[in-house]
Image (cartoon, rainbow, N blue to C red):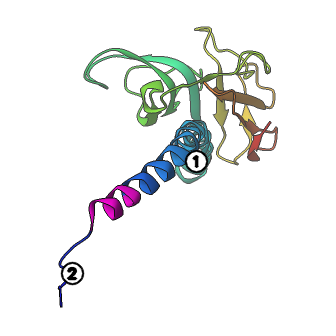
Amino acid sequence: MKKNLGFTMLELMTVVAIISILIALAIPNLNQWVSERGVKNAASDLYGNFYRAKSEAIMRNTRVTVTFDQLLSPPVVTQAEVFFYVIYVDNDNDMERDVGEAVLAMSSWRSYSGVSLDLANKGGNNFRINNQGLSSVSFLPNGLTVNLVGAFGSGTVSLKNDNNQKRAVTINSTGYISVEKY
């Protein structure tokens, strides 16, 4: 009686062919998932950091501001870079990050590969601009939002990825923050 000690070449080739077919079917879905994950992460991070800014304003009993496309230079960061957004304690209430104002959080576009502002939707970011020409919104100690002219600071940041998958992060005039797929 002959003992079977392994697999035949035909059996091995069949298994390799089946695995190759399964991988070929999975790769397009995996690429789409990774691409969609980037815009979801960017929107989720922005949503969470808006809530952080609101909570810090309430907890510290002071104004906390979020400014978009903010340039930060050393010693705050190792090299000068324009950030997607920067959250800071706005000691002088001017909605401009000044030397000595504590940075609470910052987010770089480099963290979100393939993600950008969706300029076709409300210009990508429709928060009012500060005196430096940068979109900004401040949270007050009561949790409400305000813009540079003292009105309620509502607005939306619209994000998209290379596959045109989109998310919008909105703050309404009462400080309510939401994320939606559009």
Q: Quadrant of residue 149?
A: top right
Task: List the single residue furthest toward the bottom.
Answer: 1
Task: Give the dominant element type of the magenta stretch: helix, strand or loop.
Answer: helix
Which is in the foreground here, disc 2 or disc 1?
2
Seen in the picture, residue 176 relative to 158 is either above or below; the reply is below
**Stretch of the chain drawn in magenta:** 8-15
The residue drawn where x is 46% and y is 32% is 107
First in residue order: circle 2 vs circle 1: 2
Viewer-closest of 109 and 57: 109
Seen in the picture, residue 15 relative to 91 is either above or below; the reply is below
Question: Which mark, residue 169?
Answer: none
On the image, the x and y values in percent for residue 126 come to: 75, 21
On the image, the x and y values in percent for residue 50 come to: 61, 42
Q: In the shown orientation, is residue 3 left or right of residue 121?
A: left
Q: In the shown orientation, is residue 171 left or right of residue 47?
A: right
Q: Alpha-carbon distance for marks 2 and 1?
A: 60 Å
Whether residue 54 can be seen here: yes
Helix, strand or loop for disc 1: helix
Q: Residues within 10 Å of mark 2 (few under 14, many from 20)?
A: few
Q: Determine which residue is flagged by label 2.
A: 4
Q: Determine which residue is flagged by label 1.
A: 48
Say what amino acid the circle numbered 1 marks.
Gly
